Image (cartoon, rainbow, N blue to C red):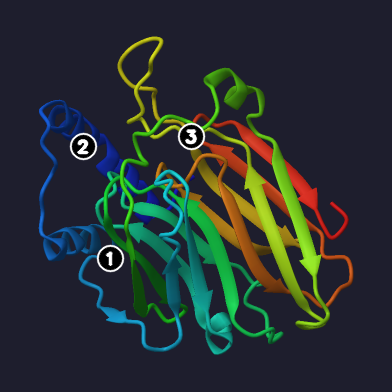
Amino acid sequence: MMNTSARIGMTKVTAWLGVLCLMISAGVAPALADGEMWASVRGDIFGERPVEVATNGYKLYVDNTIKDAAMLPVSIRIPADKVDVTSKVHLLVDYNPAPVVAVIAFGPAYRNGIDIGERKINTRIRMDRISTVRAVFETVDGKLFMAEAFGASGGGCSSASAKDHDRALAQLGRVKVKVAAQPAIGQNWRDAIVMIRHPNFTGMQPDAEKGGYTPAWFVEKIDVSLHGKSVVSIAAGISLSEDPNFRFTFADESEESILSVSAIDSKGKQFSAVGGPNS
């Protein structure tokens, strides 16, 4: 099931979609000042909790050289000295119909004491319009620190799938898991890739055959474990790209770093796979 912030994000979708469809058909774009929009998003998700600017090593990067607003790469960075105290990160896009892209919670297998330097988490997101992208890092004592970047793309929430509908459904649920080790970087350093074949329909994409819009249908939850312990748990929504893809670094002392991945989508369909260095 989705956690609270992801569920709030999807509740906002229902309200936004009807308004957006009317405004788009009339050629009108919704307008709120950046500060007002962030204040609204922040209040919905974090309430009155203070959100500090991240000056402590947390970082967020957006690759604006990629012009596909439905698959915009973003990279989240966690400094080595914050790994053990970071409980989760909220990835947000202010002007998306569902501002919560994903909430990534870090389990004990991620927040262990092995130092491999800065941790990286990369994924691809949809941008409905030019907007600020934010990563709000939450620590185990409940403090919030925000890093932000500018996303210079738009139209990604309503753009058609890169695949035709039948092909997308034929590949539905295929999960790819790979783990790489590079002793030159560090003996315990690992690089993982988790990719799930799924159209991740937003509910805003026109249905050329039936008319109207293709109903929202997306990967809702991804759990990754190592040696029976949680590495990351990801609650997601429509603002992730199709074929959700996460690449992240983690630490492991064992030579056989086998990851187990399970996922569920908004229709209740479940997918799973395991993978390691030889996958």
Amino acid type at mark 1: Phe
Locate residue 83 relative to residue 154 in the image: left or right.
Answer: right
121 w.r.t. 7: above or below = below
Q: CA distance from mark 3 to mark 2?
A: 18 Å
User: Which numbered disc covers residue 223?
Assistant: none
Q: Earlier in the sequence, mark 3 or mark 2?
A: 2
13 w.r.t. 203: above or below = below
> Which residue appears at 25% of the width and 78% of the height?
50
Amino acid type at mark 2: Ala
| Residue closest to the eye, 162 or 43 | 162
242 w.r.t. 207: above or below = below
Label 3, secondary structure: give it.
Answer: loop
Quarter of the image for residue 139 reads bottom left
* Place of residue 263 in the rendered image (x, y in percent of width and height, measured from the top left): 61, 43
Residue 187 shows in the view: yes
Q: Earlier in the sequence, mark 3 or mark 1?
A: 1
200 w.r.t. 236: above or below = above
Mark 1 neighbour class, 10 Å CA radius: few under 14, some 14 to 19, many 20 or more: few
Residue 109 shows in the view: no
Q: CA distance from mark 3 to mark 1?
A: 24 Å
User: Which numbered disc covers residue 46?
Assistant: 1
Locate residue 158 relative to residue 85 in the image: left or right.
Answer: left
Locate residue 239 relative to residue 233 in the image: left or right.
Answer: left
Mark 3 and mark 2 residues within 8 Å of each other at the beta carbon? no
Q: CA distance from mark 1 to mark 2?
A: 19 Å
* Place of residue 237 in the rendered image (x, y in percent of width and height, measured from the top left): 43, 45
Label 2, secondary structure: give it.
Answer: helix
> Which residue appears at 70% of the width and 42% of the height?
175
Amino acid type at mark 3: Ser
Residue picked out by circle 2? 15
